[in-house]
Structure formats: C-alpha cells, structure tokens
Amino acid sequence: MATLKDVARRSGLTVGTVSRVLNNRGYISEQTRQRVYDVMKELDYQPNEMARSLSKKRSNTIGVIVPHVVHPYFAKLIGSLEQAAYDRKYKILLFNSQGKDEKEEEYIEMCKSNRVAGVILCSDTFQTDKFRNLRFPLITIERFLDEGTAGIECDNYRGGVLAAEHLIAKGCTSLLHIGGIRNHRKPADERKEGFEDVCKREHIKYASVESSQFIYDEMDYYSSIDRMLDEYPGTDGVFASSDVIAAQVLQVCARRGLRVPEQMKVIGYDDVNVASLTTPDITTIRQPVKEMAETAIAMIDRVAGGEMVPSRSLFPVTLVERGST
C-alpha cells in the first residue's frame, strides 16, 4: 500500500509539500497540486482521513444542517454548498433536522466527534444553548443566532419592497402576502415588513397571512390558499414568501377560473427551478444562493486559517419578471 513518502518520492516533492496539498494549507501552485493528485491516482494512494483529523485537531469536513432536503430552496442551497466546499477541498456531512430540536442537538454532537472544520446551520430551531462554546466556527444562513460565528442573509426587507412595488406598478389595488410560520421569528419575516411598508406608503389595501408549522413541513399550501382567497375577496395581487407557495397559488387560481396575470398577478421568492417550470412561469425575487453558499464555505476556511470574518453579511436581491405578472 502506497504511503505519503511514496507519493513525495514519485512526484519529486518533499513530504511537507505533499502534506500541504492534502491539507489545503498554505500557497501551492496549481501545477504542483495537480502533480500530487496525478501521482496519488497512479499509486492508488488513499489518505487516512481519521489520522489526518486527529493530527490537525480538525478534519476537512464541514457539517451542513438543514430543515428540509426536498424543498427546492434547500436543494439548491445544498448543491451550491457542496460545489463551493469541493472547490476548496472540503467535503460536507449533510444532516436533515426536520425542525426537531433533538435531531439538531444530536447532529451537533456528531459534528464535534467528527472534528469538523465548521458547521453551516440553515435550520430554524430556537433552542440555542447547544451552540455555545463550540470548538469550530458556526455559520448561519437565513437564521438569527447570537451564538454563531457569522450570519449570512439576503436583503429580505428589500425583497418585500420590490414585490409590493412591482404589483402596484402592474395595477394591483388589493394585495395579499402569504408569509412564513406564525410565531417563528426568522430573517425571512422582513419580507412581510418591506411589503407592508410599501402598501401603507402607497395607501394600497393589503393583508398578510402566515402559515402553520405543519403546512410548512408538508409544503402543502393549497387548502389554506383557497381559504385565504375566500377571506380576502377582490385580491388581485399575491406576494408569496417562496416559489413553492407561488406555484400553488397558480394551481388554486386555475381551479377557480382566475386568469394569471390578467385577473391575478403572482410573485414568488427564491428563484428556484419551480419558478420557471409553471404555466405561466413565476415572477420572483431572486436570492443569490450560489454567492451566499460560497461565502459560507469561505468563512469557515478563513476562520480555520486564523482570520477574522464579519459577523453579518447581507446580500442584495433582484426581481426577475416572468409571465405571472
């Protein structure tokens, strides 16, 4: 079985240089890095990940905790995180908390035992004691957490402003916002605040309705949307807090015989793949998910290198106009 010394000898490099390539430590030219990888493949050399993590007191693994793996937004985020981690020579351990505190706590313990380089937390539990005194950086995405190393958010307030302004500019006079989970405070709630501030400023009739945890978990908004349109007759513009909700608004409108966009205009949020697969396709507020994911991975890498990182990073959003408005 090939050893680190064998790789160094065959590639004409020192053991220290080969070790730096494997541990992604210090500057290494791309030519040198590729030479090491080619020799490793030729010799079928397999680094001992456990031994490396013990010697470094951390591994090249990053834990990622999400509340859903099937939700299109989290699927897009996970894909972007995995690619960003791969580009920086990290691997990810993916955990699906399903919004359960006990699972999240168990996953944090698993991350500790695996000596992860850091954890990216996208789940939304509010039991925060478990996150104190961690031995690795904790980066949050779209979540409030004082105990975290850094938080990454999109400009949710601006997203709500853009949605309301667009619906009003399109001639809507009675607006409905379908938001997040009631009694659950998250950064995404600022979408509602931006939306409502514009409606008040422009003296537009509006209503904001939140969903239950069960509906969020099941991603089944159809019945509640149907009830909302009964409760708020005359609604001619809907701002949904996700593209998943917006797609189901289109379904309800189709059953009711409401033509989109002629009689009802609809805006979603996130710009995930479902937004371009419906008929009509969905106008939406685009989150820069790829850029947010790259920043999260980069922050863990920088902290591992002894650097300081900003405690909060706010990313701009943009409106993508499609057929639903």
Image (cartoon, rainbow, N blue to C red):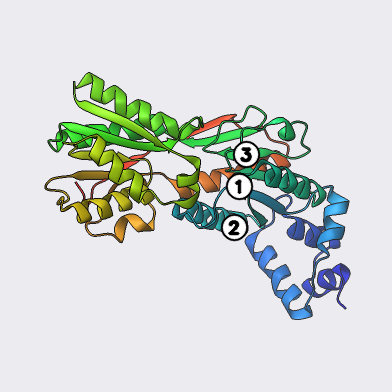
> With 278 as the anchor, is 132 left or right in this view?
right
Pointer 2 and pointer 3: residues touching (CB < 8 Å)? no
* Cα–Cα span, label 3 and label 1: 9 Å
Rendered view: 185 above or below 137: above
- Return the residue at label 3: 139
First in sequence: mark 1 vs mark 2: 2
**Residue ID for mark 2:** 87
Q: Is residue 241 left or right of residue 97?
A: left
* SS class, disc 3: strand
The picture places residue 155, in percent across and down from the top left corner, at: 41, 33
Residue at 38 percent across and 48 percent down: it is 221
Decide which of 318, 31 is in the foreground and name it: 318
Instruction: Give neighbour class at mark 1: few <14, some 14-19, many 20+ (Cα, 10 Å).
Output: many
How many neighbours does mark 2 have within 10 angstroms: few (below 14), some (14-19), or many (20 or more)?
few
* Residue hosting label 1: 297
10 Å crowding of disc 3: few (<14), some (14-19), many (20+): many
Find numbered disc 1 in the image and state the secondary structure of the residue it sits on. Answer: helix
The foreground one among 2 and 133 is 133
Q: Nearer the viewer, residue 232 or 279?
A: 232
Q: Are marks 1 and 2 in contact (CB under 8 Å)?
A: yes
Quadrant hosting residue 137: top right
The quadrant of the image that shows the N terminus is bottom right
Residue at image point 50% right, 58% down: 70
Q: Amino acid at mark 3?
A: Ile
